[in-house]
Image (cartoon, rainbow, N blue to C red):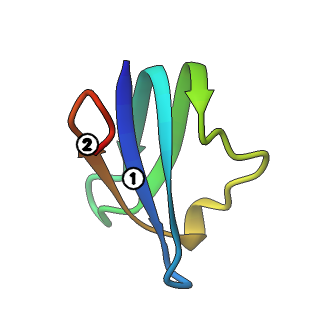
Amino acid sequence: MSTVRIFLRGGGHFDLTAEDIETRRDRSSNALTRVSWTSSTSGRPMYLRLEGVDAIVELDGEGT
């Protein structure tokens, strides 16, 4: 299991825990282009606008 904390440009954040989490970014602009996950156990957003994401930080295996 992996846990990441997703920081939003509006100042909020939430944690996403899933079996596998993958992010992709554009190398020239460093802009986030994709976030995907499999078998999420908590924190799965119903909708996530990538332009609204400020940062994604990997947390330790226990989500703390």
Mark 2 or mark 1: which comes first in sequence? Answer: 1
Q: Amino acid at mark 2?
A: Leu
| The N terminus: image quadrant | top left
Which quadrant would residue 55 be assigned to in this image?
bottom left
Query: For the residues marked 2 and 1, what is the alpha-carbon distance in whole angstroms?
Result: 7 Å
Please tell me how crowded label 1 is: few (under 14), some (14-19), or many (20+) other residues with Cα within 10 Å: some
Q: Is residue 18 above or below residue 54?
A: above
Secondary structure category for the residue under label 2: strand
Q: Are marks 2 and 1 in contact (CB under 8 Å)?
A: yes
Q: Is residue 23 above or below residue 47?
A: above
| The C terminus: image quadrant | top left
> What percent of the width, then of the height, locates residue 25?
37, 49
> What percent of the width, then of the height, locates residue 12?
53, 75
Q: Is residue 29 above or below residue 12?
A: above
Which residue is more in the foreground, 56 or 59? 59
In the image as oriented, which residue stretches furthest toward the left?
60
Secondary structure category for the residue under label 1: strand
The disc at residue 59 is 2
Q: Is residue 57 above or below residue 52?
A: above
Which residue is more in the foreground, 25 or 4? 4
Q: According to the image, label 1 marks what residue?
A: 5
Which quadrant would residue 28 be assigned to in this image?
bottom left
Q: Residue at x 78, y 45 (%)?
A: 46
Q: Residue at x 59, y 33 (%)?
A: 42
Relative placement, left or right, of 28 versus 52 is left
Q: Amino acid at mark 1?
A: Arg
> What percent of the width, then of the height, locates residue 41?
59, 24
